[in-house]
Image (cartoon, rainbow, N blue to C red):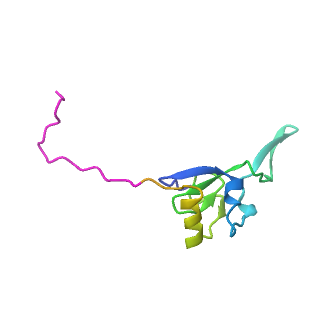
Amino acid sequence: MAKMGRYCKAYHLNRFREFSGWTENLQNLRKEEAQTGEQPVETERQLKDDNHLYLQESFIVTDGVFLDENIIFNNVTPEWIEFCKNSLKFEPPTYETASVSEPGASLSGLT
């Protein structure tokens, strides 16, 4: 089963291509479905600058929202992380854990 991360953000491919160390693992692209005759057929997708790819919280780039599927770029280096933070303004949110009330404490305003 595909694993969903806590946060990812979509960017146009041309933004990723601005990074000097960018490479694309094209064999992991999602397939497109085309109708030829009566049966749908999977076809190879061609990446264009305005296609969206997803920057995951782990700084890998995927062709879809799942962390472990269709990985296009996974060469996570300090330079890549700096590019993502500074050029792409990628900043995953910080999640805080909710505090649990003491047993027997009442919720004010609720009856």
Where's the C terminus, which quadrant? top left
Where's the N terminus, which quadrant? bottom right
The picture quadrant where one finds residue 22 is bottom right
Does 107 appear in magenta? yes
Q: Residue at the spot x=69%, y=61% of the render?
A: 18
The magenta-colored residue range is 94-111
**Residue 6 or 82: which is nearer the viewer?**
82
- Prevailing SS of the magenta stretch: loop
Place of residue 3 in the rendered image (x, y in percent of width and height, measured from the top left)? 53, 56
Q: Residue at the spot x=22%, y=49% of the render?
A: 100
Q: Residue at the spot x=55%, y=72% of the render?
A: 78
Q: Residue at the spot x=59%, y=58% of the render?
A: 87
Is 32 left, or right, of 64 in this rendering? right
**Residue 52 or 104: which is nearer the viewer?**
52
Does 52 appear in magenta? no
Residue 106 visible? The answer is yes
Place of residue 95 in the rendered image (x, y in percent of width and height, measured from the top left)? 38, 53
Residue projecting furthest to the left: 104
Is 57 left, or right, of 98 in this rendering? right
Residue 77 visible? The answer is no
Place of residue 103 in the rendered image (x, y in percent of width and height, measured from the top left)? 13, 46
Query: Quick check: 59 above or below 110?
Result: below
Residue projecting furthest to the front: 86
Residue projecting furthest to the top: 111
